[in-house]
Image (cartoon, rainbow, N blue to C red):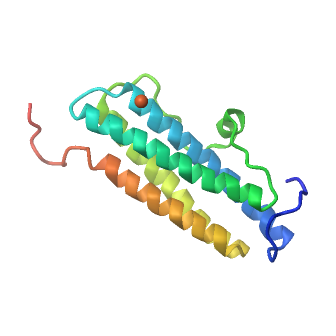
């Protein structure tokens, strides 16, 4: 990481370097998840289309706000926010999202899995930021985690109840 003056005092260089790396790791996943949500928004077809289609645009907006919080914290700490497609493609830990898929239920399940995965990694980042000594980033990740959990619920609640007979 480059050595520019941070905009905060009271955090040592080791903490700042660790936390900037952590922020960029999770930024890559958050951006990947946003793009997966838009991919579903554009392509899904099936019962419940309009509700899920519109929900996903709201979810993408909230994920962009989360990405913004994460990226700007990296800059505030004196690092670079690394959010280009090239960096994200290289750094993301999220499973590749299906490109040729229409089925709304397949999209709901594919998104649910990825929200759970990215959410779990954000939750781990809460602890890592705390251990590194940056309570503010710990708090930031807590806010992002809560939002991702809520949107995972909004999306997954559109799946049919298991064990119920499907209506034709
Ligand atoms: Fe749209």
- The x and y percentages for residue 5 are 88, 61
Q: Residue at x 70, y 37 (%)?
A: 84
Left or right, 14 with reference to 128: right
* Residue at the extreme top of the image, as rendered: 100
Q: Residue at x 48, y 44 (%)?
A: 61
Q: Residue at x 76, y 63 (%)?
A: 18
The answer to whether residue 159 is visible is yes
* Residue at the extreme front of the image, as rendered: 7
- Quadrant location, ligand no. 1: top left
- The x and y percentages for residue 136 are 65, 71
Check the image and report above or below for 123 versus 112.
Answer: below
The answer to whether residue 93 is visible is no
Q: Quadrant of the C terminus?
A: top left
- The x and y percentages for residue 21 are 74, 56
- The x and y percentages for residue 101 are 38, 25
Q: Residue at x 46, y 34 (%)?
A: 38
Left or right, 136 with reference to 117: right
Left or right, 118 with reference to 107: right
Left or right, 141 with reference to 36: right
Check the image and report above or below for 152 versus 132.
Answer: above
């Amino acid at each position: 990481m480059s050595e520019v003056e941070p905009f905060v005092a009271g955090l040592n260089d080791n903490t700042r370097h660790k936390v900037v790396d952590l922020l960029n790791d999770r930024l890559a996943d958050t951006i990947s998840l946003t793009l997966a949500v838009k991919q579903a928004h554009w392509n899904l077809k099936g019962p419940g289309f309009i509700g899920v289609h519109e929900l996903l645009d709201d979810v993408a907006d909230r994920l962009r706000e989360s990405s913004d919080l994460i990226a700007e914290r990296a800059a505030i700490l004196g690092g670079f926010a690394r959010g280009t497609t090239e960096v994200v493609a290289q750094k993301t830990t999220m499973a590749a999202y299906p490109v040729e898929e229409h089925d709304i239920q397949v999209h709901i399940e594919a998104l649910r899995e990825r929200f759970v995965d990215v959410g779990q990694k954000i939750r781990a980042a809460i602890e890592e930021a705390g251990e590194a000594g940056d309570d503010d980033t710990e708090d930031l990740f807590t806010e992002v985690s809560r939002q991702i959990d809520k949107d995972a619920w909004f999306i997954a609640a559109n799946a049919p109840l298991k064990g119920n007979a499907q209506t034709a």
